[in-house]
Image: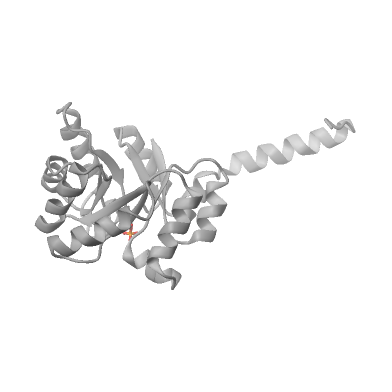
Amino acid sequence: MKFFIDTADVAEIRELAATGLVDGITTNPSLVAKTGRDFLEVVAEICDIVPGPVSAEVTATDHETMLTEGRKLAAIAPNVAVKVPLTPDGLKTCKVLSDAGTEVNVTLCFSAAQALLAAKAGATYISPFVGRLDDIGIDGLELISDIVEIYDAYPTIDTQVLVASVRGPAHVIEAAKMGAHVATIPPGVLKAMFNHPLTDKGLSAFLADWAKTGQSIL
Ligand code: E4P
């Protein structure tokens, strides 16, 4: 499973990219607004830090303007994946951009029917929002399972399932068990994935015993 980080915070991206575990980045207008920075500059900076796909979202809602925005975003760096919303205009834009060789991430997916449409429109990634479905009492992970099953049934579909709106490590683990291709993980959730109390306890005990030997490896 590939790990993307769901943030537009360049400092966080630098810190996490240094772990060597980051395969890509997703941003959205809300995440960009939190930084208070210029969107195009932020995207360029992120693309310099992370060689993998960097999702940058269009903000127009009509096809023509989305296409113009998408082309402008794609021109920033070769690793930009243009993010479009799952609307008729968004999918129309997806088709044109992906036919031209640009990676497209179709976002705001909340149903298997929408995921099927995105695949037909040539999406590189489909982003089903797990946490936002859970928030309204619908099992978000069930949607991931449905989409993986449908895509797997058609070898011609090469759209990757990008699990979005991740709220905790359990979302990542369950989605990985289902065979989802990518999870976009908030920085705090990725950091939480490292933690286990038995790791901390075991390390303390090893270090205490090692100190008793009086030895040094160096
Ligand atoms: C995905 O690309 C979105 O940016 C993101 O996962 C949305 O997550 P949220 O529901 O926590 O805002």
Q: Residue at x 44, y 52 (%)?
A: 47
Q: Which of the two residues, 27 or 210, is positioned nearer the viewer here?
A: 27
Coloring scheme used: one colour
Q: Could you say where residue 200 lies in the image, as x and y percent from the top left? A: 64, 43
Q: Give the total number of marks visible in the rendering.
A: 0
Would you say 19 lies left or right of 112 here?
A: right
Q: Residue at x 50, y 51 (%)?
A: 49
Q: Which of the two residues, 206 or 98, is positioned nearer the viewer here?
A: 98
The quarter of the picture showing ligand 1: bottom left
| Identity of the residue furthest to the bottom in this view | 36
Q: Could you say where residue 5 lies in the image, as x and y percent from the top left? A: 43, 50
Q: Residue at x 39, y 39 (%)?
A: 173
Q: Residue 216 falls in which quadrant of the image?
A: top right
Q: Which of the two residues, 117 or 137, is positioned nearer the viewer here?
A: 117
Q: Could you say where residue 32 lies in the image, as x and y percent from the top left? A: 39, 66
Position of residue 209 relative to residue 144, above or below, is above
Can residue 132 be seen here? The reply is no
| Identity of the residue furthest to the right in this view | 214
Would you say 186 lies left or right of 83 here?
A: right
Q: Which of the two residues, 73 or 156, is positioned nearer the viewer here?
A: 73
Q: Could you say where residue 122 lies in the image, as x and y percent from the top left? A: 17, 41
Position of residue 176 relative to residue 77, above or below, is above
User: Which quadrant is the C terminus positioned in?
Assistant: top right
